Image (cartoon, coloured by chain):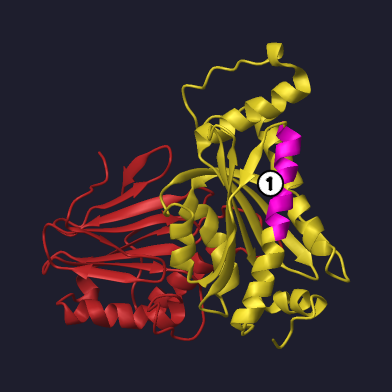
Amino acid sequence: MTLTLSEAGQNVVAGTFGRAMKRAGEALGSMSGQVIEVQTPLVKRCTAAEVLTMAGGPESIVLALYVGINGSLQGHALLLFPPSDAHRLAQILLAGLLGPGELPMEPRADPLVYDELELSALQEAGNVTISAFLNELGMHLHEPVQPTPPQVVIEMAGAVLDAVLLDLVSDADQVLAAKTTFSEGDRAIDGTLFVLPRADSLRVLLDALGAIGI
Amino acid sequence: MTLTASPSLLVAGIGEIVLSSSPDAHLVAYGLGSCIALAVWDPRTRVGGLAHFMLPSGPASPGSPVKFIDSGIDSYFRALEARGAALNRCTLKAAGAAAMLTLGSGLAIGRRNAETLQAALRDRGLSLTAAALGGNSGRTVQLEVADGRFLIKSLSSVTEL
């Protein structure tokens, strides 16, 4: 079912998602001990092909942290990093946990290879970041929103996103995509957070915000 | 062996078809996960096509001619025939239908895509010449219109079907 969203309704969703994405960036910053800049979120209705373009093209290689969104609001959230940036983030997270002397800080020869500890730290970063987003949204909702356990995949962006997009476009031609970029101060780490809600479940959010029918 | 980047590269975006009879043409679909690419090539007329299917079944979608396998496959075949391909002598090669993420609620879209494609071909008296379906790796595919070679690139390898 497609929800027809007026421009004003879409602005309400954009504002709320924007605040929640800022919270998500702050949570990632506090977990990593870094200053994270959060780009002004982009919220737009677009085709599946346009979402792939927003992710840097279908063949760009990413480390993707995926969390499914269940409950009163439903959809998908993905935090995407270029593989070398994900390595840097994993090193920063693990140095905070284990102490800097216990970790090799040199970049790996193959940026597509991660050890279990790095993947686990990155999964937790995805979990914390996306949960912060959902907690902020949850403040407006009367019923809880539950994230699924995080999954991590290193793949072509198109291949990761297509499963999510296929779930959303089976009964609609367009999806509502919210995207922001997180950058660490010196731009050594750039991440992209995508949130793709199921259009029919947005009604719950609009209702809770008093924006239905505007 | 590498995939080609050239001015004669024709890209089948998600839900789209590309066709060519030019021997210089390379038909490509990038970053397939659960989607399926079906490459059809006629060795006599050297007409080739590549369709980037998204989902098993649904109503015809004018903006995305092969969004759905069941409602899109005939328009793809008709377009190939209009270019001079005869389906009964064509090679049909498919790749994709992987499971990249566990999305819950039994959403094995890749597997359903593979089953639907095979059933749709069977219903039309056709079958796949070769296939690389399933698994959990993303794929980029390329059909060489000059000779019908079908190249599949994943993060770790390039193979030929």
> Circle 1 sits on which residue?
A25
Viewer-closest of A26 and B115: A26
Main secondary-structure element of the magenta-colored stretch: helix
Residue at (71% x, 59% y) in the render: A19
Viewer-closest of A120 and B37: A120
Q: Position of residue A148 (x, y in %)?
A: 76, 55
Residue at (46% x, 22% y) in the render: A109
Viewer-closest of A133 and B83: A133
* Chain hosting mark 1: A
Q: Which chain is yellow?
A: A
| Figure colour of chain B | red
Residue at (20% x, 70% y) in the render: B89
Q: Position of residue A128 (x, y in %)?
A: 76, 45
Residue at (47% x, 69% y) in the render: B54
Amino acid type shown at disc 1: Gly
Q: Which residues are magenta?
A: A19-32
Mark 1 surroundings: few (<14), some (14-19) or many (≥20) residues within 10 A: many
